[in-house]
Amino acid sequence: MTKKVLVMAEIRDGELRNVSFEAVACAKLIANGGEVVAALLGDSVGEMANTLIQYGADRIVKVEHPDLKGYTTDAYQQAILQVMDVEQPESLVMGHTAIGKDVTPRIAAKLSAGLVSDVVNVELEGGEPVFTRPIYSGKAFEKKQVEEGLILVTIRPNNIIPLERVESLTGEIDSVQVEIKDLRTVIKDVVKKATGGVDLAEAKVVVAGGRGVKSAEGFKQLEELAQLLNAAVGASRGACDADYCNYSLQIGQTGKVVTPDLYFAFGISGAIQHLAGMSNSKVIVAVNKDPEAPIFEVADYGIVGDLFEVVPLLLEELKGAYV
Ligand code: FAD
């Protein structure tokens, strides 16, 4: 059966996040030949509508309102509910991001919908979507189906491959006017932490350090390496607890979940709580001086050695490659 699927695109710093294109690809599959409508929420969404069409959305609805400039639960919840009311989709897809995690359970509760969160793969069985999602901190996967009614889905960034961008694609661009009232929170100011540019959750390459990095100074070398690789810097909780870096870099059960193409673990032992946040990375390279470190059990490539020897060698090699 064909379906109408709504995608909530995410904008950060005036740009569409990659996960929005992944959500369009996921929606396309769920729609099974039906219509994929992407909603763009913001105070002014400009040219981004065309980009979403080029990535496969059939139609765009712009939802522009001054209260949608930055994310607040109240404003986004109200706006999404009103768009759902106008569009009446059979399914809604968005990223399993801070915003997606916050707003989708609220929408699901309001609309008595089924919610499948943190999805890493979708297949069709008899025309109906079957979702794969990790359970037990990534140690196993379950397959889920929503038997009837509205389905809300959040997808883990970096798992579903976006459709190829076709610049010649065109589509309809509509607007939905929303009314936003009774806001309990207002954003006064956004203060950004300097984390080196690349968004950890969406990074294709992550350079992560643990307690073995030994100091904030040691992390500077990892930052340099990350810059050369266009990677994001991440960390274990050990490194964060020791104050070598900011907690916003923590990866793991109580930190961020990442699935990059390439994950470097320098001086990270590989505790189960850390593995929960990175073990689904496509290729894992571990550098640890302890040959028994559990990180080697999940690593595709392991170097038993001192990171203070290995990192400078890598830097030298990469700098040479870019001369
Ligand atoms: P360590 O375990 O101390 O390992 C340091 C490693 O560095 C060692 O393997 C050592 O051999 C190696 N090393 C030392 N010097 C060098 C060198 N010169 N060259 C190469 N290797 C070197 N942890 C997380 O990471 N993320 C989480 O989200 C998280 N959540 C948690 C939630 C709970 C409820 C609990 C109880 C714990 C949680 N932890 C989490 C903590 C986790 O259990 C570990 O304590 C933590 O991951 C250890 O960090 P580490 O690997 O950096 O440090």
Image (cartoon, rainbow, N blue to C red):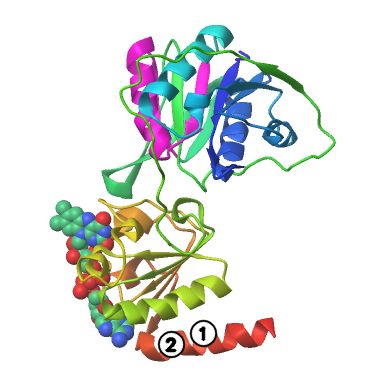
Q: Give the crowd class for mark 1: few <14, some 14-19, many >=20 residues within 10 Å.
A: few
On the rendered image, what quadrant is the N terminus found in? top right
Is 132 situated left or right of 43 in this image?
A: left
Q: What percent of the width, then of the height, locates residue 200?
A: 45, 56
Ligand 1 neighbours mark 2 (CB distance < 8 Å): yes
Q: Is residue 151 magenta?
A: no
Relative to 5, residue 229 above or below: below
Is 20 situated left or right of 146 in this image?
A: right
Give the tally of numbered discs: 2
Q: Residue at x 36, y 30 (%)?
A: 186
State yes or no: discs 2 and 1 in contact (Cβ < 8 Å): yes
Q: What percent of the width, then of the height, locates residue 29?
A: 61, 28
- Residue at the spot of label 1: 314
Residue type indicated by callout 2: Val
Q: Residue at x 58, y 20 (%)?
A: 5
State whether residue 246 appears in this view.
yes
Q: CA distance from mark 2 to mark 1?
A: 6 Å
Secondary structure under tag 1 reads helix
- Residue at the spot of label 2: 310
Numbered range of the magenta stretch? 91-119
Q: Quadrant of residue 74?
A: top left
